Amino acid sequence: MVKKRSSRTTSTRSEPSASPGRTTRFAISCVLLVHLAIVVATPAGLVMPGSRFARWILQAFAPYVQAGNVSHGYAFFAPDPGPGHVIEYELRFADGREKRGTIPDVQQHWPRLRYHRHFMLTEQLAALLQDEPPPPEDARFQRAWKQERAHWERQQRDFQQRAQAYGNHLLKTSGASEVEMHLLRHHLLTPEEFLSGRSLRDRALFETGEIITVRTGDQP
Amino acid sequence: MNAAGKAIHLWFDEVIAAWDRFWFTAIDPATLAVIRICTGMMLLYTHLIWSLDLTAFFGHEGWMPAELVTQTWESQGGGSHYFWSHLVHIQSPGVLWLLHISALLVFFAMTIGLYSRCTTVVAFLLTVSYMHRATGALFGLDQINVMLTLYLMIGPSGARFSIDAWRKSREEQGALIPNLSVAANVAIRLIQVHMCVIYFFAGARKMLGSSWWDGSAMWLSIANYEYQSVDLTWLADWPLLLAFFTHLAVLFELFYCALVWNRLTRPVVLLVAVAMHLGIATCLGMATFGMAMLIGNLAFIPPALILALQFRSGRNKPAVGGGG
């Protein structure tokens, strides 16, 4: 009995796995270098003004970058921590009832990760809302302006489609016939304003950015 | 060959030797195994939370319908993009739930180390697929989850602290000590380097904002009511302290990539990382993101330390080799 127990606890000595040969090491090294170049290229290509070389790498390896989701911008609270965004909505039912809600809702969306997912819906919707780029005074910048404007128009279209989709989802899950959504920007207080007695939830800090109304049957 | 030529040749030999030592030294897979368990638990939790709103986020009548997601992919990657997700093809809620429960089982199997070589690969594909489909609701947590899962595929993450290792030791009638592994080292090195890239660019992008220079960014973060999970607004009375923490955060992120490699500064850097991420986790409502970043930092814990802790708790004797 004792012997059996002893044999079970005998340790096998650890041996290194076969070390790769020179050619294999060279091949693996090349793959590692390309991979790490791509990992660096995404944040470098996204920092304004984005590196032209980094953007070239991202284009050249688009299948790997996009399909594998291997690299990101890593901008956490950057360049500056900005205001938060919430959606306040009012559902209107065919029988005249009305119901209000917010996205995200700290009471309803629990645990915290669930709240944060809903918060990202509003934050990333708001990120699509940019000011229209003004036309250049110098004609030499006309081409760059046209590109910026085309990008802005795409974002405007994406904003409308996403907002419409949010509205449709609220209508489908509630059975309401109409929803009016207010995208609010929650401005931040300075320390001095806070110390003077103002609350972070002061209603005056909420600025209405966009109002979107969606009705049953509207197409996204 | 003249003296200059010899010196250059010698330098090249030293560089190649250092490169080989860095990437191709075989190590014990203990650190990778701990990262597998932690990442598996994080993936399991992340996807369990998706379960609470599964059809709302992944259904075809959800916040982001499949057509809108594919349009977003086209907008980001052009007409011939390479984004993909098996979830955009699912119309039926029943099928969606079936696939989701299967995914949860894969993440669970990865956590306990069951068929680890397969489950880590499937877990990576599932993580990417969910990320692509959930466009519009993602944040830093998802980026770290996919990074860790990508590298766990490379090494033998199930060679320790796993069902796989337990079964193997039963088959071989002895307490198993796994082989030292070059693949484990490559995986750990990739996590380490990727963590350096993440911190460096997080710091570099902050350098583009004035609030990180004038010291007000920390206040702006804690005064954001939507992020707040613990009220730290009493710090308004301590502007110098807020400015100090603002600068410390940026300096830490910018110089992590240099200081974490030095044996003397590494413990300090890792302690600051723990403090910073626990702070973010507790006060800014992002416990999962904070934990995911700490899991990434585990890559800098040498296997010998993990094995020593395990040995103290009365389990297997530590293997030779190490790294870090």
Image (cartoon, coloured by chain):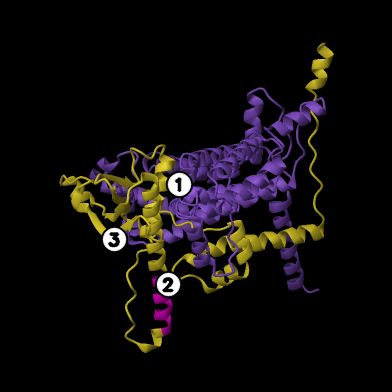
Q: Give the residue at mark 1.
A: B56
- CA separation in Å, label 1 and label 2: 29 Å
Q: Quadrant of residue A3?
A: top right
User: Residue B153, relative to residue A210: is it above or below?
Assistant: above
Crowding at label 2, few (<14), some or many (≥20) Cα neighbours within 10 Å? Answer: some
- Give the quarter of the figure containing the N terminus of chain B: bottom right
Q: Give the residue at mark 3.
A: A210
Q: Give the residue at mark 2.
A: A151
Residue at image coords 45%, 71%:
A49
x then y, percent, for residue B207: 40, 61
Which colour denotes chain B?
purple
Provide the chain ID for the residue under circle 1.
B
Pointer 2 and pointer 3 on the same chain: yes
User: Residue B244, relative to residue A64: is it above or below?
Assistant: above
Residue at image coords 37%, 44%:
B284
- CA separation in Å, label 3 and label 1: 23 Å
Magenta segment, principal secondary structure? helix
Could one spot residue B216 in this view of the protein? no
- CA separation in Å, label 2 and label 3: 20 Å
